[in-house]
C-alpha cells in the first residue's frame, strides 16, 4: 500500500508539472503574439523628432513633391503622382508616413490638426481680419465686428473662469479622447484629494505649449473627473489667449481663465469648496528649455503660486509630466548661448517667449508644426497642506518655507516615477 500510495502521489505530481508547463507555454505563446502585434504597430509609428540632416532632406523632398504635383493637371492624376512620390520617398528611407495606417490613427491626426492651439489662433485671427476686409464697405456687417473687438478688451469672463455654464459639456466632448489617444496622454493619481478643500496645482514642465496640461486637466479625456470626484479644475493660461477673436470663445467654453493673481484669488475665494486651479509654474521662460529627453525646470524664483495658496488657504499639489518635452524638437539654445540671449531679449520686449520648435507634418515625420506621437504621463503628487495666511505679502519667510517644501515634494515625485515613465531622460535640473 505504501508503494502504491507513492506511485499515485508521483503520478499526481507529474500531472501538476504537465499542467504548469502547458500554462507556461500558453503564456509564452500569448506574449509572443502580443509582441508581434506591437512590433507591427510600431513600424508605422512616429518615433519622435528626427535628426537635422534627415529633416533637411525630407523637407527638400516634400518641396519637390509639391512642385511636381502642382505641375500635373487633374485631381486623380495628382493623387496618383502623390502616392507614387510618397512610395519613392519611403523606398529611399525618408520618414514619410506609411500609406496604410489604421483608421483610428487617421482620426486622431485629424482631431489634433483640428484643435491644435497655435494653428487655431492663426486661423481665427486671419478669419477675423479677412471678414473685416471683405465687408469694409458694408457698415451693417462691419459694425458688429468692431463691437466684438471692443467687447474682447472689456470682457471680464476670462478672470472668472470662462463660461462655466457650458464648461462640463465642452470638457466631455468625445473629440478630446481622440486627441489624448494620439500621443497618448495618461493621468496618474498618487493620493486622494478631499472635496472640502481648495487646491493650487503646479504643472511641470511647460514644454512648448503644455499639451499634457490641456489634455489631462483642461478636458476630461483622461478621466480627471473620475479620479478626483468633487474637484472642479480651472486651467490658467496666458492673458494674450483671450485677445484672439473667436478662439477665445472656444477656450472659455472649456472653463479656462487668465493667469493673473486677481483671477486666481477670485476663483479660490469662492464660498464653494472643491475648487482647483492649475498654474504652469515655469511659464514662457521654461518653454525655452523644452527639448527631448531633458527636464529643466524654472522654479527656484517662482514663488507667487505659493503666496496665492497661503492667502486663500489652498493646498499645493505638485504635478510632473513625463514626455511633455519630447513631442517637439528644438534648436540648440543652451543657457548662455547667443541664440538664448536673443530669445531672452525678445521675451522681455514682446512678453512672449520666441520658441523655435520643429514638429511633424501630416504625411511625414521630419518637419512641421504638429506634435510628434510621444507618450505624456502626468503624475499628480500628494497634496501639501498649507495653512491659511490671509495677510501674507511678497517676501515673507512663510512663503520661502512652503516653497521649499513644494520643491522637495516635486523632486521626490520625479525620482519615484522617472524610472517607470522616462527611464532614458536626463536628471531633473532646477533653475
Image (spheres, rainbow, N blue to C red):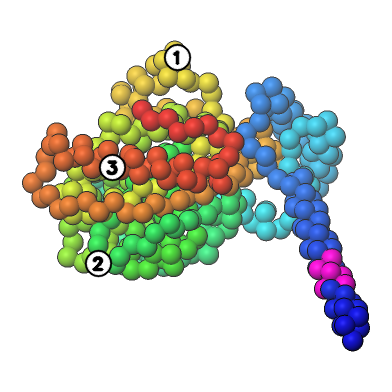
Residue reaching furthest top?
A: 338
Q: Which mark is residue 25?
A: none
Q: Which mark is residue 196?
A: 2
Q: Which residues are magenta?
A: 14-21
Q: Which residue is mark 3?
A: 405
Q: Are marks 1 and 2 in contact (CB under 8 Å)?
A: no
Tell me which numbered mark, 1 or 2, is placed earlier along the sequence. Answer: 2
Residue at image position (45%, 33%) is: 428
Question: In which quadrant of the rendered image does the N terminus lie?
Answer: bottom right
Could you tell me residue 107's position as x and y percent?
Answer: 64, 56
Question: In which quadrant of the rendered image does the C terminus lie?
Answer: top left
Q: Is residue 416 above or below residue 90?
A: below
Majority secondary structure of magenta residues:
helix
Q: Is residue 263 above or below residue 29?
A: above
Q: Are marks 3 and 1 in contact (CB under 8 Å)?
A: no
Q: Which mark is residue 337?
A: 1
Could you tell me residue 326's position as x and y percent?
Answer: 55, 37
Amino acid at each position: 500500500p505504501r508503494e502504491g500510495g507513492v506511485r499515485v502521489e508521483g503520478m499526481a505530481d507529474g500531472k501538476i508539472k504537465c499542467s504548469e508547463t502547458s500554462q507556461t507555454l500558453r503564456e509564452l505563446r500569448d506574449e509572443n503574439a502580443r509582441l508581434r502585434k506591437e512590433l507591427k504597430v510600431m513600424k508605422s509609428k512616429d518615433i519622435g523628432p528626427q535628426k537635422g540632416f534627415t529633416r533637411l532632406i525630407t523637407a527638400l523632398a516634400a518641396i519637390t513633391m509639391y512642385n511636381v504635383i502642382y505641375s500635373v493637371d487633374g485631381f486623380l492624376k495628382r493623387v496618383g503622382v502623390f502616392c507614387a512620390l510618397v512610395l519613392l520617398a519611403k523606398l529611399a528611407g525618408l520618414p514619410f508616413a506609411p500609406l496604410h495606417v489604421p483608421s483610428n490613427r487617421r482620426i486622431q491626426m485629424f482631431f489634433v490638426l483640428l484643435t491644435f492651439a497655435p494653428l487655431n489662433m492663426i486661423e481665427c485671427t486671419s478669419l477675423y481680419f479677412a471678414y473685416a476686409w471683405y465687408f469694409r464697405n458694408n457698415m451693417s456687417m462691419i459694425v458688429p465686428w468692431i463691437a466684438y473687438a471692443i467687447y474682447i478688451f472689456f470682457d471680464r469672463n476670462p478672470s472668472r473662469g470662462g463660461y462655466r455654464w457650458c464648461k462640463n459639456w465642452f470638457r466631455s466632448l468625445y473629440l478630446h479622447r481622440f486627441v489624448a489617444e494620439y500621443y497618448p496622454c495618461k493621468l496618474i493619481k498618487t493620493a486622494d484629494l478631499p472635496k472640502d478643500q481648495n487646491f493650487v496645482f503646479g504643472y511641470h514642465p511647460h514644454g512648448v505649449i503644455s499639451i499634457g496640461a490641456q489634455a489631462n486637466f483642461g478636458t476630461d479625456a483622461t478621466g480627471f473627473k473620475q479620479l478626483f470626484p468633487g474637484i472642479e479644475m480651472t486651467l490658467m493660461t496666458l492673458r494674450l489667449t483671450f485677445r484672439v477673436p473667436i478662439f477665445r470663445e472656444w477656450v472659455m467654453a472649456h472653463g479656462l481663465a487668465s493667469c493673473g493673481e486677481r483671477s486666481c484669488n477670485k476663483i479660490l475665494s469662492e464660498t464653494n469648496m472643491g475648487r482647483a486651479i492649475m498654474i504652469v509654474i515655469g511659464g514662457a521662460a521654461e518653454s525655452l528649455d523644452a527639448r527631448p529627453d531633458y527636464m529643466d525646470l524654472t522654479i527656484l524664483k517662482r514663488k507667487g503660486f505659493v503666496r496665492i495658496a497661503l492667502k486663500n488657504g489652498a493646498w499645493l499639489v505638485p504635478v510632473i509630466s513625463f514626455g511633455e518635452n519630447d513631442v517637439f524638437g528644438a534648436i540648440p539654445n543652451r543657457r548662455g548661448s547667443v541664440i538664448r540671449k536673443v530669445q531672452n531679449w525678445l521675451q522681455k520686449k514682446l512678453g512672449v517667449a520666441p520658441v523655435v520648435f520643429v514638429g511633424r507634418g501630416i504625411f511625414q515625420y521630419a518637419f512641421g508644426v504638429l506634435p510628434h506621437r510621444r507618450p505624456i504621463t502626468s503624475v499628480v503628487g500628494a497634496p501639501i497642506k498649507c495653512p491659511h495666511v490671509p495677510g501674507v505679502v511678497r517676501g515673507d519667510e512663510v512663503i520661502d518655507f512652503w516653497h521649499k517644501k513644494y520643491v522637495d515634494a516635486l523632486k521626490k515625485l520625479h525620482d519615484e516615477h522617472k524610472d517607470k515613465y522616462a527611464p532614458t531622460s536626463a536628471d531633473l535640473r532646477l533653475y
